[in-house]
Amino acid sequence: MWESFIKTVESVNSAINSCVWGWPTIILILGTGLLLTIRTRFLQIRKFGESLNTTIVPTFKSLGKKKQMDGRVRSISQFEAFSTAISGTVGTGNIIGVVAAILTGGPGAVLWMWISAFFGMVTNYAENVLGLYFRKKDSKGNLSGGAFYYIAYGLKWKWLAYIAAFFCAFAAIGMSGVQTNKISGALSEAYARATGVTDNAEIVKLIVGVIVAVLAGFIIIGGIRRIGKVASMLVPFMSLLFIILAIIAIGRNYFRIPEAFSLIFTKAFNFNAVGGGILGFTFATVIKKGMARGVFSNEAGLGSSVIAHSASETREPVKQGLWGVFEIFFDTFVICTLTALMFLTTYDVTTLEAGMDDSAMSMSMFSANFGGFGTATFSIILPLFAFTTIIAWSYYGEKAVEFFFGFMKEKNRRIPVIIFKVVYVVLIAVSAMIHSGLIWDISDTFNGLMALPNLICLVALSGLVAKITKNYFDRKKGLDVEPMLSAYPDMNEEFKQDIKAQVEE
């Protein structure tokens, strides 16, 4: 009966997925990024240096320093907001997702990941700008924002905002499902390699799923502050460890780097089957896998990471928007590129066969370069990547449910949020047992459905993004213009006073 149910789900999802990830969505993602790039005058290039100087550089300089908050607005630091957002984006998609894209779409899929990320940098920037500009504050002083907020209060299409919130909640479940599935798959593979026992793989997966669910539940109950603190501790560690190992592995096979880049560029526009053991894939498949995995990895266009950014203490929408530029750059151009080069320099992809398990191949990539140490390290890195994504998306789903039931009184609104948290944690354990390919496809489908309302709104409000951007940089030049910090006059005035007080200090 379970197998019959799974086949039905697979059939229904396949039909929806083929529509959601058709050419219209791909054109909309690229078109939105292109429009925003033009309207902001290639901000991701012009202001990339500034995005570093106003975000990650001062953050490193301020490490260890305590900051006093005014207490009027309950928020988290810019770095904690960034860490929560980056923990939502830097996950299994950066390792296993890239490997899966290459196995199913060929090396050319990597180029389409880069293209989507280039435009995604300004798309994510725009999401953050609008998210902070239209965010709201509850009675306790908590700041909340996201795609559904700027759709509802910027575009003023509340019906579309509710649709976006609905799909966000399901996208959160789908995203966490992939992460847990990959943790259980990787650890069961590591267990099998260490013990030589392969018969009880399903039991190992279930045990892993339950453990992940319990740990995630503990952190999720603590809300955004606990999530932010955990993410800010884990993200730098796991990212640095992965970067070091990837560079060493690529360095060991440096003579294959030119060949790897050649495959990426020559196969990106390949209409024919790739030689060797890989099944033939069409030009459309290359783009689809590259774009879908790219969006899965960096989330630009989904309107998800902006939910974490909106809880930031910063009063300047553009300032947090610049974090979004760096976020996509780090996620795709650093982490995903290192994964792709590591895989392509380790294996001759023309000899690989279609249908190979992406989790097993990812682990083999580490073990081929570092032996038993690589297997052990992968078994640490992947769960950390995946776990931080799980807890970040729990917050995204929670805020979506909170918005969806916004018509209820604030106290009563906690009931559907609690129900969502319980369901979310339970499904974390269940997803450990689902077939790998199906869990990827379900997540892709909900990501696409979540992206559509957000992209429509970004196109409609692209002029406002350009206006807020100009306002910020005009003020930086010393021009006397009224700050555009919030769409609501009372909050705009409050934030103006906060900025003034910070300058006087």
Image (cartoon, grey):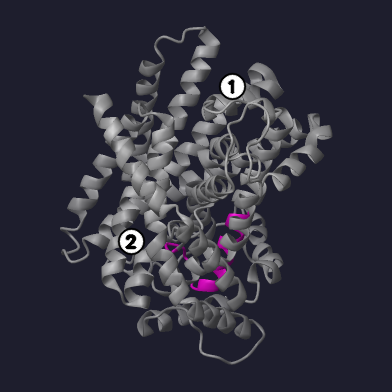
Q: Nearer the viewer, residue 102 or 422?
A: 102
* Residue 412, image quadrant: bottom left
Quadrant holding the N terminus: top left
Pick the residue in front: 20 or 470: 20
The disc label shown at residue 164, or none: 2
The answer to whether mark 1 and mark 2 are in CB contact below 8 A is no
Residue 437: quadrant of the picture: top left
Residue type highlighted by circle 2:
Ala
The answer to whether residue 228 of the structure is visible from this angle is: yes
**Residue displayed at 24% across by 25% down:** 2
The mark found on residue 376 in the picture is 1
Q: Nearer the viewer, mark 1 or mark 2?
A: 2
Q: Position of residue 444 (x, y in %)?
A: 43, 46
Q: Position of residue 33 (x, y in %)?
A: 56, 66
The residue shown at (55%, 79%) is 466
The span shown in magenta is 310-329
Q: Residue at x 48, y 82 (%)?
A: 484
